[in-house]
Each structure stands twice: as structure tokens, then as C-alpha cells.
Amino acid sequence: MDAHQVLTTTRSVRKRLDLDRPVPRAVITECIDEASQAPTGGNVERARWIVVDDPATRAALGAIYRRAYEPYIAERRAALGEAAAGASEATRRVMSSSDHLAAVIERVPALVVPCRFDRPPVDSPRNLASFYGSILPAVWSFMLALRSRGLGSSWTTLHLDHEPEAAELLGVPPTATQVALIPVAYTVGDDFKPAARRPAAEITYWNRWGNKGAPA
């Protein structure tokens, strides 16, 4: 795939993850190698990747995810309330696919937990942005690398509601930070398309918030 196709068709894949096709470890490490080329603050490599492909560990991590998912989705549905019946088709699709992932997450061939080996700063927005800005580009690059090889993924963070329990399961030291949980599998079909998004002209400001002046 060319860069445009990868960038515009990398979707959150849940229902179309192939739960029966193994993902070779070599494919995942190739994608991590590519992801490691992402920029980091001070050019210091603080990212660490935990790839969970052991069935028992996947099951335990999936249970942690599901325990966080159930109250989250209940709250979402309660917030919609009577409006749920009139929710957009896109919203209904997302909730349905999210339900599906929660139900089968332990069957996904690999669950990847990107980490930093330090903890988030609390002293300033700048330092916090720098902390996450030195690993999240690599996580997204990892997902793009997967897509380029015919694999799907989804960015999830719900298990972080129980981060200490996940850390104990995975042997993550208390000085390190988990930043996501990425289900990884080959996809069922490959007909992914660009999502409906607002055009740049509607969401881009020039020189000052709210100024949508035409670009030169």
C-alpha cells in the first residue's frame, strides 16, 4: 500500500479481527522495529512493548479489560438514555463493535501493551505532553505498520482503569507506565475505506482560534 492508502484506511478493527489465524511473532517485531523510528523527546528511547500471545495471560488480561468495559458501556448507554433509539447509525455500529471486542478480546491472537519505563509527570502540561508525545507517535506508527501488512488493530485504554492489576499480571514494574492495549490480528477482508470526516476547511484555524480565513 502507498502512504495515502495506509493513512486513510487504518480503522479501529474489532468485528473483523480474524480470531483463528495466528500472527507470527516476526511480523509483530517487524512492526515494532518500524514504530521505533517515530520521534521521541530528546531522541531518548523509553518505549517498551509487551506482546501477550500466551492464551492464559490473554484470558486474564481480557478479563481485566472486560471488567473496565462493562461499567463504561453502561454509563455510555445511560447517557444516551431515550436518545439511544435515535442514535446515529455510526454510533450504533461503534457500540456494537465495541461490545463484540469486549466479548472476544481474549481470543485475539496478540494483545500488545506499549509502555514507558517511567511515570507521567504531574508538574506541568508541557511535561505531560512531552511524556506522551514521546510514545504515542510510535504506537500509531505500529498500527499503521500492521495495516500495511494486512493486519488490523484497535487503540484501547480501558484496562488502565485497573493498571496495577494488569501490571502485576504482566510483571510491569511500578516505575513504568502502560499507555494502551492494542488487539492485533489479521483482518477478515481488506475493503477498508476512508471514514466520513469533516474537511480541513471546517476544522482548521489560521493564526487565531476561530479564524477560518482561506489559506493563501
Image: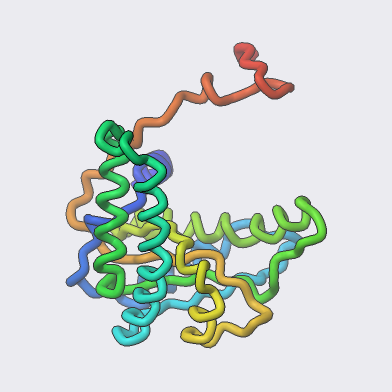
Task: Specify whether residue 23 is in view.
Answer: no
Question: Does residue 47 lie above or below 205 as drawn?
Answer: below
Quadrant location of the C terminus in the rendered image: top right
Q: Residue at x 36, y 63 (%)?
A: 70
Of 185 and 154, nearer the camera is 154
Question: Does residue 51 lie above or below 179 as drawn?
Answer: below
Q: Based on the displayed image, in which of its 4 quarters is residue 26 positioned?
A: bottom left
Q: Position of residue 178 (x, y in %)?
A: 56, 71
In this image, 170 relative to 108: left or right? right
Question: Does residue 158 lie above or below 62 as drawn?
Answer: above
In this image, 185 relative to 134: left or right? left
- Snapshot colouring: rainbow
Task: Specify whether residue 102 is in view.
Answer: yes
Q: Residue at x 38, y 57 (%)?
A: 154
Q: Based on the displayed image, in which of its 4 quarters is residue 5 positioned?
A: top left
Q: Position of residue 32 (x, y in %)?
A: 48, 68
| Name of the residue lying farthest toward the right | 123
Q: Residue at x 35, y 74 (%)?
A: 62
Of 11 and 170, nearer the camera is 170
Of 202 and 161, nearer the camera is 161
In this image, 154 relative to 170: left or right? left
Question: Does residue 142 lie above or below 105 as drawn?
Answer: above
Q: Based on the displayed image, in which of its 4 quarters is residue 152 positioned?
A: bottom left
Q: Total of numbered circles in the picture?
A: 0
In this image, 172 relative to 63: left or right? right
Q: Position of residue 211 (x, y in %)?
A: 67, 17
